[in-house]
Amino acid sequence: MFLKMRTALQKLRHLRFDGRQQARRPTSSFAQEEASRYRPGQKIHGFTVGEVSAVPDLFLTAVTLTHDGTGARYLHAARDDSNNLFSVQFRTTPTDSTGVPHILEHTVLCGSERYPCRDPFFKMLNRSLSTFMNAFTASDFTMYPFSTQNGKDFQNLLSVYLNAVFFPCLREQDFRQEGWRLENENPSDPDTPLVFKGVVFNEMKGAFADNEQVFAQHVQNKLHPDHTYGVVSGGEPLAILDLSWEQLRRFHATHYHPTNARFFTYGDLPLEQHLEQIEQEALSKFGTIDPNTEVPPQPRWSSPREAHVTCSPDALAPDPARQNTLCVSYLLGGITDTFEAFTLSLLSSLMISGPNSPFYKALIEPKIGTDFCSAVGYNGRTKEASFSVGLQGMHEDDTERVKRIISETIDDVIAIGFEEERIEALLHSIEIDMKHQSTNFGLSLASYIASSWNHDGDPVALLHVNRNVLEFRRALKERPRLLQEKVKLYFKENTHRLTLSMSPEDTYMDKETRAETEKLQAKVQALCEADRKDIYERGLQLLAAQSETQDTSCLPALQVSDIEPTVPATAVQDGSAGGVPVQYCEQPTNGLVYFRAMCSLNSLPEDLLLHVPLFCQVVTRMGCGELDYRQQAQQMELRTGNMSVSCHAIADFADLDVYEQGVLLSSCCLEKNLPHMFRLWSDIFNSPRFDDEERLRVLVMMSAQELANGISHSGHHYAMTRAQRHLTPSGELQEAFGGMEQVKFMKRIAEGSDLNLVMRTLPRIKKHLLNPDSMRCAVNAAPQKTPDAAAQLESFMKDVAANKKALKPVKSNIRERPLDPHGPIRKLIAEPQFQPWEMKTFFQMPFPVNFISESSRTVPFCHEDTASLRVLARMMTAKFLHREIREKGGAYGGGAMHKGGLFSFYSYRDPNSAATLSAFREGVNWAKSGRFSQQDIDEAKLSVFSGVDSPVAPSDKGMRRFLSGVTHDMKQQHREGLFAVSHQSLVQAAERYLGAGQRTRGVAILGPENERFQKDPSWIVK
Ligand SMILES: [Zn+2]
């Protein structure tokens, strides 16, 4: 995977633990105590201990070590968390855009000395209970992380990872499959034309179709033009075609050496065991080299520079006349100065985050553009950090105006500085982030320290976040103008400054295509008859290798018997507050309280449904009670860890024609701030402000822009939602809330000149939604804090009681379902007359690759066949679809999944369309024929269980029951169903649900112009 610039750049806060949720809080400190026994200078398994440092704020003890024989660096973070993580990273600093580090990242995972079977990495996904396995290529390092809760699994995966990176086979065939190759379009037919193929080649073509990513890439390349940041580490599609297998092998020899490696382990497993295995299986076989991978400092410019680039026009742009991007970027200091980097990242947040920041006021509110540009904010992912600010979605005529505003805003900041309350709010959000426990804490840490450590910064200093906060407070007290001085130095007086603009060009795609065609012609013309024959034969060889049944017995594996037969139930208590049902879940939440409320949509008139996502977006962001939107944002940041609202449409666990529709309110805060948080919610219930048209327009534009940008990287999600649309009543609703229909609806609203209708609609929606009569709540808090939370909730309900109205549901068929036999009632909608229907939709998009999905209606969660369908989806992905769609087809990804009573196939960044659709069909035939082994079934079960048993954070415990009514007994029954899945039940499930004509199917494709679908009357073309 090529680490996206955007994801890295959007990390505005210094430390952010987001993503999936965490296993368990440290209840004892056993792992930390063990680790604190180590002494500097102590020798363990070929390593020497450097520093041992307790980090009480993160409940961990850090130990640094150096390997004596190779100089490899090592950091261990001991913490009582069973979700153990390993990661090894290499400093990979390319000097061309052939994508050599990226293709190498893919290729080392294709087989190694000890594990010579093809693709051990993907095979291990099915032989392990890993909670995470992946590999990333960043601009200057390549990282291989995994995590698991099982000790034996950890050793197995460690062995495979070590062997992959240090002793890969790097066969030419792997290079051709993963990198690029010239091959007959149909490899078995020498008369079909020669074309370029390859997984990374297609992945990067897809990545380069994302204008936001392209822009962020240009900013980095042009701001640091003189060395590794001046090139594309992921690979420019056409430059990839210049890379040779020999160059790849050379890059491996010089970069994947222990001397150039940094190892990180995290969790409650003993450090010594890790060290021993790493020493024995890898490091003892190496000496020291001079890796010479350092990045030199970027020579500073004596005067600012300007540049211009073009991009593909965006068919979904909220306003087609406004598709320009402009950005000013500043090169800052080195990221290894931990405190300076911390200060600058805080400063960047103060400048651009939220409606109270100066750049938001100066650039976003005047609506010159739709949103900030993708590169906005602090970027600490390069050796020297940078800061960028600018707009996307703007008119070309506004270029000079935007430049002027940026420079004036910087002058204003130097003159005025920042309000103390804003600085407090930002430091508060850092405190919340440290206390909130995510399930992938180890991975967050690995990614947090990676860049600075990569350039020999001190990773332990980074972990002491609180020290940095205290030092920052002290520095600010001593020098109240500290931040203004930094702005003057780094922005106003900085001559290493780049102004980059980007505009759409109608012929952009044609030019790209032409350049590829010319490159192809040049390569093809240079071929003699013997070369062509050789290409044809090698194509056949690759195809044969890909189709061959693999002997994977060399790989370590867990067994189905290693899986726990039962899992403990999460205890919850049902209560009520002001007549509203409340679920309490007592958890070690580390000083935070989590509050959620599910509000029913049952009484909302149907013509308002499409407006609900917009309502969710704006209801916490337009002001409430006495507070205007700025004051509200300030209070939310100062007192809470976020307050948000999202749409909810979910099929019933027992009947697919029954579903629940609602919106979910979510928030959290420090225990002491609970009254403040409920005060904010009650102001939103009692007196939300929907009358500020200017504010609404800003939010509408940002929202439409975000949706339009999302399609190029989440296209499979949109294809799947569309394919499922007509299969169940809830599918219909999901498309309206988050599918292409919603994207087009928001585009229409953003294009309209008048928002009056929307402004009249929002209060109408509010009346139906924020109504205690059709609500249920959930609170997750520490046991000793729960009574107080209950009292606060009671008083909140009194404050909002005036909103309680018994409204008539719009649909007459209401099905009442208790949360569990004795729990509170959920009111679901039943549509027993619903008829699923076939629909094939093609969306023509300005991308060079396709996103495809085909979906069939099956059975709900509680049905006995669900377990087989779930295992079947996993097995088809691993044993059939991955090979056909990714390895042979060259798509970046593809597979099948079963969820919510729907069995869906999908492909991601796929050069093919018709071939992929037939691969889906062949997959079904393969499953029906029963040509799979018990080993295949067991592997698929293991893989399903690693999802079922993935850790759940204290904040999310009990949420499955609260949201969907799935009880512990149902989960246990499903678990037993999974264990019982057999060869026979899988074949039957394939026959019963996936055979042609068996079930109603939906198909959707997002992709480039395609005559085949345009001519075929069975397809709807959009
Ligand atoms: Zn990749």
Image (spheres, rainbow, N blue to C red):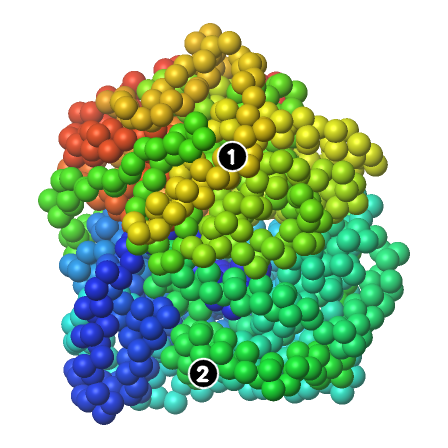
Q: Is residue 130 above or below residue 962?
A: below
Is 656 placed left or right of 683 in the picture?
A: left
Q: What percent of the width, then of the height, locates residue 331?
A: 66, 78
In which quarter of the view is residue 258 placed?
A: bottom left
Q: What residue is shown with label 2?
A: 457
Q: Is residue 873 above or below residue 373?
A: above
Residue appearing at x 36%, y 25% in the figure: 824
* Residue, far left: 561
As drawn, the label of residue 798 is 1
Q: Quadrant of the N terminus?
A: bottom left
Q: Quadrant of the C terminus?
A: top right
**Is residue 734 in view?**
no
Q: What percent of the width, then of the height, locates residue 613?
A: 60, 35
- Foreground disc of the pair 1, 2: 1
Residue appearing at x 77%, y 42% in the figure: 692
Q: What percent of the width, then of the height, locates residue 144?
A: 36, 65
Q: What percent of the width, then of the height, locates residue 615?
A: 63, 35
Q: Is disc 2 placed on a helix, strand or loop?
A: loop
Q: Amino acid at mark 1?
A: Lys
Residue appearing at x 67%, y 54% in the figure: 631
Q: CA distance from mark 1 to mark 2?
A: 54 Å
